[in-house]
Amino acid sequence: MSTDYSRGLRLAAAAVGADAVTLRETLSATNVHLTADPDIPGVLAALSVMVADLRRLPYQLTLDPTGGTAPIPDTVLTDLQTLVSGIDPDRPLRITAAPALCLHVHLGVQPPSGAAFSGAPDGHGVRLRHRGHAFPSLNAPGSGLGTVLTAATVTAEVFKRTTGLRPGTYGTAPTLDFCPVTLATEPGMMTDTLSEIRSTALVGAGAIGTGITLILGLMGTTGELTVVEPESFEPPNVTTYSIGTRHDADERVHKTQLVRRYLPRMDVTPIPHSAQDFIDAVDNGTAPWPRTVLGAVHSVEARHEIQRIHADLTLDGSTGGSAGTTLALHEAVPQGPCIRCYYPQPTVPVGPSAEQLLHEATGLPLQRIARGDELITDADLDGLSARHRAALLPHVGKPVCGVSNLMGLTTTDADDFQPSASFVAQQAACLVVGAMIARRTGHAAGPMRHVEYDARVGPWYDMTTPRRPRPTCTCQTDADLIARVRAHRRREPESPPSTPHGQVPAA
Ligand SMILES: [Zn+2]
């Protein structure tokens, strides 16, 4: 069985406006050539993340270990080869000088003359320079957050230059400087980090959740993390998630165990169930109530579940938009704005949702369709009418969420599932972890923020919007009830004093 590139290609095809087959041929014929300056702190870690991100698309990959300011050690090359073969054993990373026709990409601040562009981590952030634009002095050694953001940003740049995006649909700035903690353009100035976290839950170990895991691992964060995720790792996840191999997919390793394995320095508590099951366990006293929730789910319903945890602070990451390249952070507090303020249930019908259309076309129950990442099995056909069985039979073995697209069902529902690429999900994960650092260190203490940009364009000056609660949201109309629930989960007898709007209680 060969590696399944379909999800990443579907994203790319939507972004470009091409068909996935043509795009696959284009990318398969494109050689991306890599060099790096291994003496810059964080560059080798960024190289590892970037090689994996690029391997999750069907490029030809080459690397010249002597192309930078110092040779890349043989042990690093061996690790890179292992990483690549874990994703696709049929497409190795070739060690060679630059081929005649290639897109040459560098990591470090002294790119060779052939490099089209180069990126380097600076503290928690990234600096990117196209040919002819010199790097300034770096402010700080690259952190785990900076290395992942650098890899994801440079991979996005490769994506933009190789997929044939239409002019006007992507950013062309020759330089980029960005810190996901300060959300400003001067990275490396704020270097406080998360050496230890406690009372924190990651809900969702999918594309964004594994991106968050990657960052926490590379930052060397210690402490405790509860991971809530009901599903196992499947073959299509290999090319869209930030961790996990073909072997893990063949073994159907549970996603919570994947996270635990990647974070050996942390005490990870796997909750292999839904967020609602987790809430029940919290209320029963069999699971700890997290004061910070990192949300990494992909439906409105799942986001509403996450809000019902009523944590002190919820940081929700998302990817989506018409091309799947839009990424966002939503900061939420129980006093409002909560996650429901960002994602209200539509009160005016906007036409049938993707789930309703799929339900009508196949007879699959809506509760089953909600488990979008689970593959359709023969058991799902039981009890369906002959017409519905015939419609669903060709899709056995595929995830439910992709079937709407495959069946050509169209919808006006903005919540339709979009496939994502690891480099897009990683940028969303960087915003989530950046916000966690900003809130825990007191760098950000003001109103909750909504941050959103398109990976084809990159972060820009007006991507941040302060948010206020919606007056009709349950966080406002049911404020007393929510305060009582929170007191119960704190195991306190009486309601706490209400927290001033926009303030996050100390964890
Ligand atoms: Zn609300």
Image (cartoon, grey):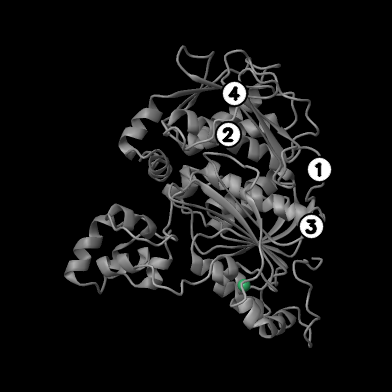
The amino acid type, in three-letter code, at marker 3 is Arg
Q: Nearer the viewer, mark 3 or mark 4?
A: 4
| Secondary structure type for disc 2 | helix
The amino acid type, in three-letter code, at marker 4 is Phe
The residue that label 4 is drawn on is 117
Between the residue at mark 3 and the residue at mark 4, the CA separation in whole angstroms equals 34 Å
Q: Is residue 86 above or below residue 310?
A: above
| Secondary structure type for disc 1 | loop
Q: Residue at x 67, y 46 (%)?
A: 215
The residue that label 3 is drawn on is 440
**x and y percentages locating residue 455 in the rendered image:** 54, 42
Q: Is residue 61 above or below residue 226?
A: above
The amino acid type, in three-letter code, at marker 1 is Thr
Q: Are marks 4 and 2 in contact (CB under 8 Å)?
A: no
Crowding at dot 3, Cα within 10 Å, few <14 / some 14-19 / many 20+, comes out as some
Between the residue at mark 1 and the residue at mark 3, the CA separation in whole angstroms equals 13 Å
Between the residue at mark 3 and the residue at mark 2, the CA separation in whole angstroms equals 28 Å
Q: Nearer the viewer, mark 4 or mark 1?
A: 4
Q: Nearer the viewer, mark 4 or mark 2?
A: 4
Q: Residue at x 73, y 41 (%)?
A: 124
User: On the rendered image, what quadrant is the N terminus found in?
Assistant: top left
**x and y percentages locating residue 142 in the rendered image:** 74, 35
Residue 156 lies left or right of residue 146; in this view the side is left
Query: In terms of sequence position, does the residue under pointer 4 or pointer 2 come before the other?
Result: 2
Q: Quadrant of ligand 1?
A: bottom right
